[in-house]
Image: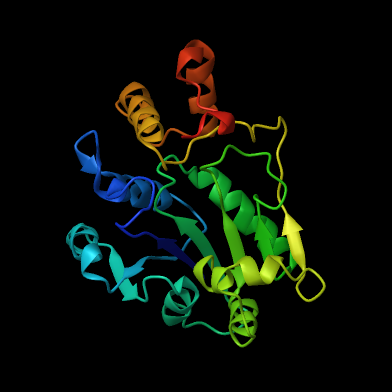
Amino acid sequence: MVLAILQARTSSHRLPGKVLSPILGVPLILRALERVSRSEQIDRLVLATSTDPSDDALAAAVAEAGYVVHRGPLDDVLSRFLQVIDGPDDSTTVRLTGDNVLTDPAVIDRVIQAHLDSGADYTANTLERTFPRGLDVEVFRAGALRSVAALALEPDEREHVTLGIYRRPEVFALRSVTQEPDRSELRWTVDYPEDLAFARAVYEHLFADDPAFGQDDIVALLAEHPEMIRRESDQG
């Protein structure tokens, strides 16, 4: 069984409340979950948020939409994940984030399949970036995360969940997934108001004709409308 955990919280430092910001009348977080749900490899999907009162509205909106919600520590996101993971050590977990509202199910499935084929402890398309920022996918063995959790970790390793794994390549087997052409300069995640405006514009152009639009559809849109392009160098 492949478990996907999508982490989100309302108290974003750069754009507070972004996960509940509407995109075509639907909260951003539900748009993200909608896209992840189209993955053919994922068997179970859980939204992992915090027990902090600031996330009450987020948890309620997601639960009311019919998704499974787990609430755990606000800053110790590693513990939050471990509370959700209930499979054996060789089970597969996918880490996704709620600010990636343009995530591509085909990319998710590609990274999952690469992980299953390789037998690695950790597989990601972020170790060597060739995908747009916003299509990030991390896949790992449950046992690898449990092993990391038993170590004396730095605070950032508890906040960023998988950092303790890929920071230790001498301990864990890592697999990198890349693509050609390299599109790593493109920025499709939502951290700033400009990012949210971009995501809304993409949905306005593509969603009505194909709600399951993917990476190639966005690239084709940007070729027609280069003025829309957001690059990593544009952040902020």
Going by the image, does 195 lie left or right of 24?
right
Q: Is residue 1 visible?
A: no
Viewer-side residue, 158 vs 14? 14
Going by the image, does 97 lie left or right of 182?
left
x%, y% of residue 149?
58, 83
The chosen color scheme is rainbow
Image point (46%, 74%), residue name: 81
Residue 73, image quadrant: bottom left
x%, y% of residue 209?
33, 24
Q: Is residue 134 visible?
A: yes
Image point (47%, 14%), residue name: 227
**Above or below 65: residue 225:** above
x%, y% of residue 22?
23, 39
Image point (35%, 34%), residue name: 193
Image point (72%, 33%), residue name: 180
Going by the image, does 227 lie left or right of 88?
left
Residue 208, image quadrant: top left
> How many numbered tags mark residues here?
0
**Above or below 175: residue 15:** above
Considering every residue shown, the one lying at the far bottom of the view is: 150
**Above or below 31: residue 47:** below
x%, y% of residue 127?
70, 53
